[in-house]
Every structure is written in C-alpha cells, then in structure tokens.
Image (cartoon, rainbow, N blue to C red):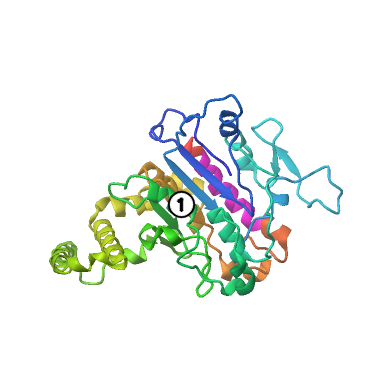
Amino acid sequence: MFEFTNGLRDSRRAFLAASATSIAGLPLGLSVATAAETAPGRAVRQGSAKSTILFFLCGGASHLDSWDLKPKAPAEYRGPFSPIATSAPGVMLSEHLPLLAKQAHHLALVNSVAGTVNTNDHHAGYYHNLTGHVPDQSFRTLGNNRTPFPDDWPFMGTVVAAKREPHPSLPNAISLPHKPSEAPYTRPGQFAGRLGVENNPLYLRGDLEKPLSFTAPSLQLQEGIDGSRLSARRELLGEIDNCRRGLDQFTTTRTWSRHQERALSLLASSNTTQAFDVSREPESVRHRYGDDVNAMSLLLARRLVEAEVPFITVFWKENKSKFAKKCNSAGGWDTHGNNFNCLKDNLLPTFDRGFSALIEDLH
C-alpha cells in the first residue's frame, strides 16, 4: 500500500491530504510515517488523509518483476529485468518503471505481506484484498461461481463511505472504470455487503475506445427526459412516498427510498457532470497520464480527490481484444503466458506513465 498523506507542496491541491494505494497481488501495509507514529511510546494522532485512491491491478501484477526484483537471487529464481536506482535511497524498482523511480521518495513499499489461506482462486483473492477478511468455505466449494452475497463483509471503501459525513453533491465512494469481472463472474468483495446496498459505491463506466467518456449507468436520463421533467417526476415521487409512509416499517422500502433520493440528487447536480468530465483537463495534463482508459481513470480519480470524495477505486480495465491472445490472459495483469514481453511492452509502461503522473499531481 502506498500512502500520500504528508509533505504536500503549496499548490491548488495543497488543501487536500490525499492518499493512494496500489494493490498488485497481495501487498497491503502502513506507510513508514504511519508505522513510526504508532511505535511504542509515541502518541497516536488522527490521520490527516481526506481522500483515498485505491488502484487495483486486476489479475495481480508480478511483484517480482516490478517492485522487488531480488537481484541477488539465483538466475533461475529472479526474472530477466534489471533493477534501477530511484529517488529514494536504497530503493530499487524495475527498469521498466523509470517514471515511478523518480517518484519513489513518495512511496512506501511493502514486500513482506503474504496470504495465509490459499484457495488458488481469483474470486477469493479479490474478496480477501478488498474486504480484509479471509474468504469463507463457500469460495472453495463454488470457485468462480461464488457470486457476491448480501451478507459478505463490506468492501473497505464502503466502510469509509458509511462512516463519513455525506458529501454535499457526490457519493462518498466511487468505483471506475468497470466492475470486475464480466457477468456472471462478478467478483465478490467490491460491494457493501452487510452494510446494505445503499452504501454501494457509485459505478462509473469507462470505454476502451473512448477513454475520455465516463458514464454512470445508474444515473443515465432516458431520452426525452430533461431537467424540468426530472423535477416534476421528483415531486410526483414525493407525493407517492407520502401516501405509503406506512410501509416504512420495512427495511427494503426505506433502503429503496434512500437509493431513490441519492440518484435524483446526483442527476440534478451540475457538480456531478463536471467532476466526471476529464475533457476539462488541459491536453498537456491528459498527455502526461496517457491515452488509454486506465490513464484517464487515474486522472478522473485525481479530480474526484479535488472534489473531496472520500474513497475512489480504480480497477484496471482489461483489454481482451488487444492482449488476451498475446498474454494468455483476460487482457489484464494475470499473464499466464508471455509474461515478460507483456509486462515490458505493454503493462508496465502504461502503469508507469499513469501512476507516476497521479503521484506527481497529488504532491
């Protein structure tokens, strides 16, 4: 986990205490500063982070070929990539992460975390990483048929969202640019579970072919419905709600009402569309991040931090048509074949460019 909660330079973003996390497989942990503050004899102070970005590399990136190359290991164990020096003394990264190497003084790398329960299953891995809870026996028995359950432990972002004061115009938790994985194999762990569906993140959909375009499927107005008709419908719904208050004893009815109110508020808010519009960024800024949907998702995450959204999750969007055959994968980081070429030619350079730009902007 990488946290950026200290040392922000004076800039138009200096009022934010922003943090970012990047999960590549199973690395989770505390920043060096946080660990020092919690050492014996040190008073624990309230954290300063207002927003968190979780950047999840779907499929699980090779730690050995990116963050911890183990150059002193025998050749049969280490990979072919060479380590390079970084801006952090003593920290080495893959030669294919040159831009991140310049930002390494902002990172806190954890190379020592390992799973204690091996199900050899992506569903269980997602659930463990996203909720912090060990997968139960249903993951072993059902495998990839294990769908999200309503009593699952909640995704960490939904816990933050539920405990924070409501944002004035945006949801407290937003996930983009896709929901891993494709139906019917939707990954457990990315939803609110036992916290209730009203705490689910707002989902923004990104398009591989149109990387500047982000839409919220749950907030799309039907053709022919403008702002005035939306207001009229809202008033009508209010009248209907007044007539059915006797049903409020039922939890599902109350939950639906909260869903309804949140959706209508977001539809009517100009702040919503502005925050989601990465085309408002200068072309030079967009170019620093890259030209694909994952790069623009990181840029949008930065915009949402500036809008003070508490928790933003970027799930790396796989490109099956471009990489599935080459890498024997779903198009993401689960490189079953041709691992080194896929990392060297495609995945690591794209990740390096976008993530380094995000770190630079947050600081």
The structure residue drawn at horizontal position 54% and vertical position 58%, both measured from the top left corner, is 316
Name the residue at the top extreme: 41
Residue 282: horizontal and vertical position, in percent?
Answer: 39, 45
Q: Is residue 282 visible?
A: no
In the rendered view, would you say 165 is above or below 179? above
Q: Is residue 47 magenta?
A: no
Q: Main secondary structure of the magenta part?
A: helix
- Residue on which the image places disc 1: 157
188 displayed left or right of 110: left
Location of residue 105 (image quadrant): top right
Please state which amino acid type lies under the numbered disc 1.
Gly
Residue 336: horizontal and vertical position, in percent?
Answer: 70, 66
In the rendered view, would you say 224 is above or below 130? below
Location of residue 331 (image quadrant): bottom right
The structure residue drawn at horizontal position 64% and vertical position 69%, both measured from the top left corner, is 140
Residue 38: horizontal and vertical position, in percent?
Answer: 57, 31
166 displayed left or right of 174: left
Determine crowd level at label 1: few under 14, some 14-19, many 20+ residues with C-alpha closer than 10 A. many
Q: Which residues are magenta?
A: 344-359
The structure residue drawn at horizontal position 59% and vertical position 67%, both measured from the top left corner, is 322
Residue 220: horizontal and vertical position, in percent?
Answer: 30, 66
In the rendered view, would you say 265 is above or below 249? above
Q: Secondary structure at mark 1?
A: helix
The structure residue drawn at horizontal position 47% and vertical position 53%, both measured from the top left corner, is 313
